Image (spheres, rainbow, N blue to C red):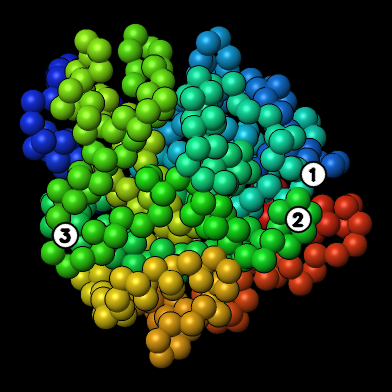
């Protein structure tokens, strides 16, 4: 997202007067059709080349230090600790367990995002080699137990970590052991936004099934093809999962606002410091209505609060879809291609609606949960998710070609779907490809992992 003008920054720091300001803030993300683009955010696990164990902050800090000044990157510090890198239009950040994330620049097309990812991949692989670091496009740490993974020294995680113990049994696993792939997408107005939020939620089981890549935990099969999906479901029911009201045909943007208002606050920020709000279930609605001490809620507080919501699809204010596991590099652009193909044309949107709108809410929720365990073999009335995914990939490919023909893309981007179309055709997910060969010594398993999802491979 582009930096806000000084006038907007000033308005963000004034107290909120009415609920409409919250919706208006989200609608700042609206753009005309000819300005739509795509953003790709990729998390990856950082492990030791020789042991496969998660590495601690000091080794990751050394990596960031070596990248500082290369390709326009500049160090980002918190409490004098190097915790990320900022470029002109992209950034590198660290998740709580040291997972490395690239928030790529918002591009006019997927080809641009792919080039951006490859430049970054080459930088981290080159620098990481000298430090015996390997980067894995995998959804969950494969070997290191939770208690042996260091916390990244950031103030917000000092608040979030303990709170996670109160809301579910896997919140700290989510924070320290998981990695995902996210896509940011545009909308034109409120109606378009809400329709895309609904369709993107319907696509969540398809995304989990197609991109399942987290079957191993602490060296053993977990019983899930996307264990990451199960972990997220047991993290915090207030702020994770599906926003059920948005699945209804009569939903509106106000439903997203109402959902967000009732999620408890983690913290507010004043004078550069986080102030813990987790001792009671103090929601943003309560903050807005009664304030906290002498502080009143501002749009800057609203923006910070939105960043702490983790549903499958969220608005910040662009649409961000969050269901895909971390993936080997060559599959990453396929996530963007799937969503761009299905959300950026009428044939894509209506194709998803035709398949899923007849399901009851209960039926869809069951399908959603089953997709983490069964992948493309998940049953749906009349068939399996493999059959649905195959149909939707064909629609997405036609849609991407249509966007090129209409001048909405600089090239035919349907080829980015080829890698995942192979998975849909075979019915065997990346997770199952790994499981079938998961045997032998730690060294043999490491070699398998590096081949399966190492960032040194394209």
**Residue named by callout 2:** 449
Q: Earlier in the sequence, mark 1 or mark 3?
A: 1
Upstream in the sequence, badge 2 or badge 1? Answer: 1
Marks 2 and 1, how far apart at CA: 9 Å
Q: Nearer the viewer, mark 1 or mark 3?
A: 3
Disc 2 residue crowd, few under 14, some 14–19, many 20+, Cα 10 Å: some
Pick the residue in front: 283 or 196: 283
Write down the residue under mark 1: 52
Q: Which numbered mark, 2 or 3, is in the foreground of this view?
A: 3
Where is 257 relative to 286, above or below?
Answer: below
**Residue 143, percent across and down?**
76, 48
In terms of secondary structure, where does tag 3 sit? loop
Residue linked to disc 3: 251
Task: Please determine whether, in this image, residue 198 is positioned above or below residue 41.
Answer: below
CB-based contact (under 8 Å), mark 2 and mark 3: no
Q: Is residue 336 left or right of residue 297?
A: right
Quarter of the image where one finds residue 285: top left
The location of residue 374, given as percent across then percent down, is: 57, 73
């Amino acid at each position: 997202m582009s930096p806000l003008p000084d006038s907007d920054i000033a308005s963000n720091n004034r107290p909120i007067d009415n609920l409409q300001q919250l919706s208006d803030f989200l609608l700042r993300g609206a753009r005309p059709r000819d300005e739509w683009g795509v953003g790709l955010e990729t998390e990856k696990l950082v492990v030791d080349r020789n042991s496969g164990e998660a590495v601690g902050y000091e080794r990751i800090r050394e990596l960031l230090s070596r990248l500082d000044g290369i390709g326009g990157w500049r160090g980002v510090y918190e409490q004098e600790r190097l915790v990320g890198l900022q470029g002109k239009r992209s950034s590198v950040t660290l998740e709580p367990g040291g997972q490395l994330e690239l928030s790529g620049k918002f591009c006019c097309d997927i080809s641009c995002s792919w080039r951006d990812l490859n430049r970054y991949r080459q930088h981290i692989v080159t620098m990481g080699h000298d430090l015996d670091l390997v980067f894995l496009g995998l959804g969950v740490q494969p070997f290191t137990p939770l208690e042996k993974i260091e916390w990244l020294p950031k103030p917000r995680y000092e608040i979030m970590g303990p709170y996670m113990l109160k809301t579910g049994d896997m919140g700290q696993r989510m924070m320290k052991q998981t990695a995902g792939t996210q896509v940011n997408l545009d909308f034109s107005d409120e109606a378009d936004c809400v329709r895309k939020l609904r369709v993107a939620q319907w696509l969540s089981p398809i995304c989990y099934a197609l991109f399942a890549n987290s079957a191993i935990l602490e060296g053993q099969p977990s019983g899930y093809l996307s264990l990451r999906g199960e972990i997220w479901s047991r993290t915090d029911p207030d702020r994770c999962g599906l926003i059920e009201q948005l699945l209804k045909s009569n939903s509106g943007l106000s439903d997203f606002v109402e959902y967000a208002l009732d999620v408890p606050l983690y913290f507010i920020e004043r004078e550069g410091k986080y102030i813990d709000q987790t001792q009671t279930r103090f929601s943003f609605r309560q903050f807005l209505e009664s304030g906290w001490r002498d502080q009143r809620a501002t749009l800057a507080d609203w923006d910070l609060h939105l960043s702490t919501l983790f549903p499958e699809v969220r608005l910040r204010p662009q649409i961000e879809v969050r269901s895909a596991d971390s993936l080997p590099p060559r599959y990453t652009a396929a996530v963007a291609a799937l969503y761009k193909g299905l959300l950026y044309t009428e044939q894509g949107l209506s194709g998803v609606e035709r398949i899923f709108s007849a399901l009851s809410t209960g039926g869809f929720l069951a399908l959603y949960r089953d997709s983490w365990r069964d992948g493309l073999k998940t049953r749906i009335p009349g068939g399996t998710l493999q059959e649905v995914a195959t149909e939707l990939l064909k629609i997405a490919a036609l849609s991407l070609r249509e966007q090129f023909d209409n001048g909405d893309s600089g090239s035919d981007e349907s080829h980015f779907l080829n890698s995942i179309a192979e998975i849909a055709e075979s019915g065997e997910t990346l997770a199952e490809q790994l499981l079938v060969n998961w045997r032998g010594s730690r060294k043999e398993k490491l070699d398998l992992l590096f081949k399966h999802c190492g960032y040194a491979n394209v």
